[in-house]
Amino acid sequence: MAKKPVQSQPFNIMIVGQTGRLMYEAVLFAASLRHTSPDFKGRLFVAVPQPGRKWTSNPSIRNQDVLAALEWLGVEILPFDNKVFGEKYPYGNKIEALHALPEGEPFVFFDTDTLITGDITSVPFNFDRPSASLRREGTWPQPTLYGPGFTGIWKSLYKRFGLDFESSLDRSQPDEYWRRYLYFNAGYFYYACPRKFGHRFQVYATSILKDPPIELVGQSLDPWLDQIVLPLVIHSFGGGRDALPPGYLDGSISCHYRLFPLLYARESDHVVDILEEVTTPNKIKKVLKNYDPIKRLVIQGKGHRVREMFDRNDLPRKEQALRNRIKSEGYWMR
């Protein structure tokens, strides 16, 4: 008799939405989740920053068509207040929004510019061992000629928070090569309790922002602060680069496309098919056509002109080369 598949632990999903591009991406994310993961029983939250002293204008979602589409897709709007970051560092929304999630309930955070392309309930999360996206480039740090190298910079951060630096290293990679050091893209991350994770994330981030170690002189914290802090938080909770088997997130189950021209340039046929299928229903299409990149590239089909420019089996090594080619042909939109 065949064994029943092991049911994944219940969990919630959070993305951040606000007026402008992110609210349309939130509709698309929710539509893709409902299409590909009908068995997902958790709650889907769109965390929305509220107006306050950290914003010069109102960041909340007020578009009634967008709100109606999100409600139809079973989304729960999760208002939260910015006490630390806000307009000057909007990437901090993913940190502060964690405080508004239900305490003690496992969560997965995704950047809003993500599509769910497979059954999210099939991902073998171990929420006691957090991890995050390994789809990244060596963007930080950028050691200077006369300053400390990768080891000196990262070691100073682990020391700041009383963490064991040596156990974070990937010793299969050479010394002073960026892949040796724990580094993630913050496009997704997960843990057993959002408030514990968010509290530590915020404490570490504000410490580095207000009083960076001397080894960080010459290093940019904007926009990299969240990705500098994330590996420290994950390591502090006993997680790491090997906590989730490869091939699920940033693989068959999710795609962090970032921008629609890049999606058409480099992602698989399956991702493109999901994108175009979930934007077909009129209740979704009538909302998303108000966002020009989706209207032109997806609904009007011009994304396939971008797609024809590139061989997915022989893409440029650096993303900037993709961007430059797309811009030269007049199809760059964001």
Image (cartoon, grey):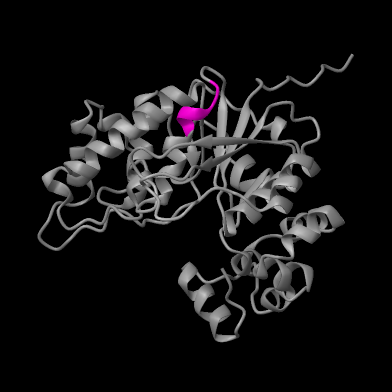
Q: In this view, does 316 lie above or below 25?
A: below
**Residue at left offset 42%, top offset 48%:** 91
Residue 198: x and y in percent read: 41, 30
Position of 192 with respect to 210 (left or right) is right
Position of 25 with respect to 301 (left or right) is left
Q: Main structural element of the magenta stretch: helix, strand or loop?
A: helix
**Closer to us: 249 or 295:** 295
**Residue at left offset 16%, top offset 41%:** 211
In terms of image quadrants, where is residue 311?
A: bottom right
In terms of image quadrants, where is residue 167?
A: top left
Q: In this view, does 278 lie above or below 103?
A: below
Q: Is residue 241 visible in the rendered structure shown here? A: no
- Residue 11 included in the magenta stretch of the image: no
**Closer to us: 319 or 103:** 103
Residue 84: x and y in percent read: 33, 40
* Residues shaded magenta: 98-102
> Among all residues in the image, which is located at the extreme top?
1
Q: In this view, does 170 lie above or below 310?
A: above
Q: Is residue 229 above or below residue 19?
A: above
**Residue at left offset 72%, top offset 47%:** 117
**Closer to us: 199 or 235:** 199
Position of 22 with respect to 39 (left or right) is left
Quarter of the image with the C terminus in it: bottom right
Q: Is residue 69 visible in the rendered structure shown here? A: yes
**Residue at left offset 36%, top offset 57%:** 139
Q: How many labels does the image show?
A: 0
